[in-house]
Image (cartoon, grey):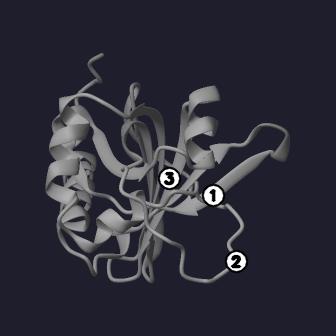
Amino acid sequence: MNSPPMPSELASIHERIWAELQRAAAERGHPWRTPVLATAAGKAGCDARIIVLREIYPEVRELVFFTDARSPKVGQIGHHPQALMVAWSPELGWQLRMAARLEISTSGLAVSSRWARLKMTPAAQDYLSPLPPGSPLAHPMPERGSREHFAVVTARVERIDWLDLAVAGQRRALFDAAGARWIQP
């Protein structure tokens, strides 16, 4: 689906957003590296948690993060794959709200190749617990298992709501399938 051409200032902002997202995935200290992900949680209404951006693909509008395949968010995404991610950068004065459609992969080359890189790092411990996330523990340090429960989540961004909280005045723009346009902050 092709969007109409963007006016130059909006096109520059859109490019900068994706460049900052790429920086966020590469730089640990970037504030957009850990956005809040909100999903539908059935009778509980909604659920939100912080995730860590691992990979960004601007050309196809995709963000990638990892999770434990047994986590509640996996079931929530399976029932309702629409989600909202919110990120704030004090340095830029920018807030992003990104509506996305999520897809979970627990097997295949995309998962096994990422696991092969991750399993030799301390982050691998997050996916080796014999208990699913949220399980009660007798001690604060859980035991580790040997089987991975690793999943890759791909978020196809369908809409970006950008808010610039500048001292000189707030600006807001929407980027989606209908194109790019200024909207009231």
Neighbour tally class for label 2: few under 14, some 14-19, many 20 plus, Cα within 10 Å: few
Residue at 29%, 76% in the rendered image = 30
Which residue type does callout 1 highlight?
Answer: Ala
Which is more N-terminal, label 2 or label 3? 3
Which is more N-terminal, label 2 or label 1? 1
Q: Secondary structure at mark 1?
A: strand
Which circle marks residue 78 in the picture? none
What residue does disc 1 label?
A: 48
As rendered, which of 127 and 65 lies closer to the eye? 127
What residue does disc 2 label?
A: 138
- Image location of residue 33, percent across then percent down: 33, 67
In front of the other: label 3 or label 1? 1
As rendered, which of 22 and 127 lies closer to the eye? 127
Q: Is residue 64 left or right of residue 56?
A: right
In front of the other: label 3 or label 2? 2
Neighbour tally class for label 1: few under 14, some 14-19, many 20 plus, Cα within 10 Å: some
- Image location of residue 184, percent across then percent down: 56, 53
Q: Kindly indicate whether the residue at mark 2 contacts the one at mark 1 (C-beta within 8 angstroms).
A: no
Asked whether residue 178 is in view, the answer is yes
Which residue type does callout 3 highlight?
Answer: Met
